[in-house]
Image (tube, coloured by chain):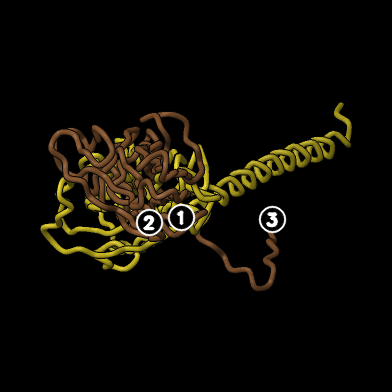
Chain colours: A yellow, B brown
Amino acid sequence: MASPVTPVRRIFGTTVGRAAIIGAAGVGGLALVSTSVFATLTAQAFNTTPTAVTAGKLSLIQADNGSGFTTAITKMAPGDTVNRYVQYTNDGNLDGQDLRLSLADSAPSSLTNDGTVGLSVSVSQCSVAWTASTGACGGTTTNLGTSTALALKTTPLALPVVPTTPAGANIVAGQQIHLKFSISLPAGSEVTINGVEPVGTVQGKSASLTWTLTETLRDATTTNS
Amino acid sequence: MAAALAVAIPAGVAWAEPQIFATTANKTPLSISVGRFSLAAVLPQKSGTNPKAPLTVSLDASNGRGQLFFLTNFGDLAISKFTMTQSMTSSNGSATVQTSYCAGGNASGAFTAIDTCAGGGTLTRAATGTQTTLVTVTIPAGDSRQFQMVTQTPSSGKDNTATLSVQVAPSGAVSPAASNS
């Protein structure tokens, strides 16, 4: 004979089983819902040909025109001026500006340590190449500046080469600059009397000069294209 | 979490854009040397040590009419002109002393004897008595040029002492440096 409580137990058992199934389904559903919320759909676009970006190059080179800075100047006398010709080229592909001249002497003497009796230099530009043997300029001559050797060792001389425009970028890529350096030794009071040189004489003195030209990169630009 | 970067900029200091330079220089330094010009009177040899002093000649009127001497260029630059200063004292009277050289000819200004030029040169007066004069005579570097100093009152019994100084200014030196090259 069956126990009177058996159906109740069955009912209870069934209810509990269904609840467990429903709960599991609920958790699974929530999990599915949560996963769907955080999923991202993306779309991409890119250039099939890479954008090429290259940095430009700023370069300055020099070449003697005639004796230039290569051939020594010997037995210079006070009062003499020796002209030497050098050609500079903005050899890079970027424009430049603000050309400056400085000087170093590896064997300093009063020639470069004395601003009065020592060497001085004047720089001028010809719009075309100088004729070194005669000093002739077949184009337009522009005086760029004058300084003493003493000053050049510490204070570079600005050389406002032509053309002066466009401002901030007047030394265009590939431009050649034809310069004349007039190196002078002042006559001063160099008088020898009965074979005696004056006190502080520059006679017999020497120098070993390195001339450095510096150009600055053109002004920075922002372009739209 | 956001990160914060703070940069303190002192008041009055402006931002400087970094600058890019290109330089060029002569690889071998340019050598410059200055020559020397140094002229002095020497006696009696043609060359010799630089006396670094004026030349003093005693012309004894009773013993000799004159004296030959040289102006030597002790420098390494040719000299094309110089200043000659002659002064004199006389112990007995005021006899005059003259300094001369031989111009032209083919003997580089040499004398064969007092008052006699070699090689067809012409005796040329440079200074008389106490006088400063500019003499235009070229004396190559390391070379000498002959001169004479004579009294104009020979055999008079008067003694004359003459002092000769020479000086060279830069304009009198000849530089071999080409002005354009």
Q: Mark 1 lies on which chain?
A: B
At 23% from the left and 52% from the top, the residue drawn is: A178
* A37 or A63, nearer to the observer: A63
- The residue beneath circle 1 is B88
Q: Can residue B26 be seen in this view?
A: no
Q: Mark 3 lies on which chain?
A: B
Q: Do marks 2 and 3 both belong to one polypeptide chain? A: yes
Crowding near pointer 1: few (<14 within 10 Å), some, many (20+)?
A: many
Looking at the picture, does residue A133 appear above or below residue B4?
A: above
Q: Distance between the residues labelled 2 and 3?
A: 104 Å
Residue A160 occupies which quadrant of the picture?
A: bottom left
- The residue beneath circle 2 is B96
Q: Which of marks 1 and 3 is nearer the N terminus?
A: 3
Q: Which of marks 2 and 3 is nearer the N terminus?
A: 3
At 15% from the left and 50% from the top, the residue drawn is: A134
Mark 2 or 1: the one toward you: 2
Q: Earlier in the sequence, mark 2 or mark 1?
A: 1
Q: Distance between the residues labelled 1 and 3?
A: 98 Å
